[in-house]
Image (cartoon, rainbow, N blue to C red):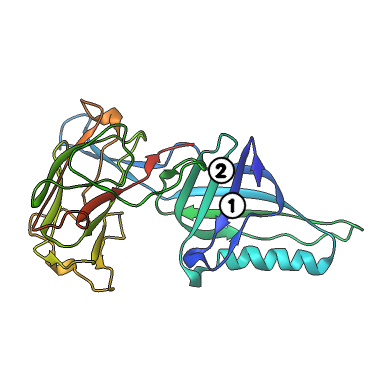
Amino acid sequence: MNIDGRIFAIVSAYDRMTLQLPTLAVNIAGFGEAPLQQISTRTPLRDGGIFLAVQTQPREVVFTLHMRATTRAEMWELRRRLSNLMNPLFGAFTVKIYGDDHSQYELRQCHFQDGFAGGIGLSWPLLKQDMTVTVLSYDPMLYQLPSLEQTSTAPTLTQELVFPADFPIAFFTGYGINQVVPVVTTGNWYTYPTIVFTGPVADPYVENLTIGGKIGLNYTIPNGITVTVTTEPENCTVVDSLGNNLFGYLTEDSDISTFKIAPEVLCDVDHNDIALVGQDVTLGVSGMALYWSNRWVTL
């Protein structure tokens, strides 16, 4: 679907099917400001109230499609492929947005909500069908991905931080990892990173010194093994490269459900100071890395 220089694609869960819809999108609504619920408190017998916080609400996106085909069989196949992409038995799917400036965004945790009605026209030689599909995303923020020209590289161990630098970065000093690095996010909402510890390393932890929050392990990661900590809301996991669940090895002061990186608009010095610490490491092998996407409340 191409709207105002942007291409929208639907990607099914678990990469079972990917389809850039061969349709003309008549209208797309729902990519404005993310829906938020105000949380406040009121004191009895007093006017007004006190604002406490906001809570994100599911985002509703409505696609109005004008589907075209040359045969009735082709039209039914288009419907079937679209239905498979949004099949709730496959779990959540993703809506991807590509800009003509090579920008790329993702709307995640999407589920089919309503619509998909409409009949197939009888005009010849062109068959057409108009339909409206409503999608509900339970993570309403838009994840910005690197531009299409950029490629991801493996972490490189270094004895000092050199700028400009790209993430992921791994650090080494002596026989331990002990660094404080500035991390800048250019979005306008909190982002929840994925943390990767590469062994050998003992008792590793990552701490956000700017806004608070820590992720640590009471565990020695063997040589050649990686441990991936996912802090994304509703998807917090600690798993090693062998598939073992290490959630029980989190330190008592770990903030697995709330650990985050603040956007630069909320940081006094325009960045987060992130501490990366670990013991008993091997030069050229051990490391730590952070992966994240900038998150936006609107396109």
Q: Kindly identify the amino acid type of the residue bearing the numbered disc 1.
A: Ala
Residue 270 higher or lower than 245, as above or below = above
- Residue 15 lies, in percent from the top left, at 51, 65
Dot placed on the residue nearer the N-terminal end, 2 or 1: 1
User: Where 277 falls versus 50 (above or below)?
Assistant: below
**174 vs 263: above or below:** below
Mark 2 residue type: Tyr
- Residue furthest right in the image: 124
Q: Residue at x 56, y 43 (%)?
A: 98
**Residue on which the image places disc 2:** 98
Instruction: Please identify the quarter of the rendering in which residue 272 is found.
Output: top left
**Residue sitting at 65 percent across and 60 percent down?**
116
The x, y position of residue 101, in whole percent, is 56, 34
- Residue displayed at 20% across by 29% down: 47
Rendering coords of residue 229 (x, y %)? 24, 59
Q: Secondary structure at mark 1?
A: strand
Q: Which residue is mark 1?
A: 9
Residue closer to the observer: 210 or 162: 162
Q: CA distance from mark 2 to mark 1?
A: 8 Å
Q: Residue furthest front?
A: 284
> Which element is circle 2 on?
strand
Dot 2 crowding, Cα within 10 Å, few <14, some 14–19, many 20+? some
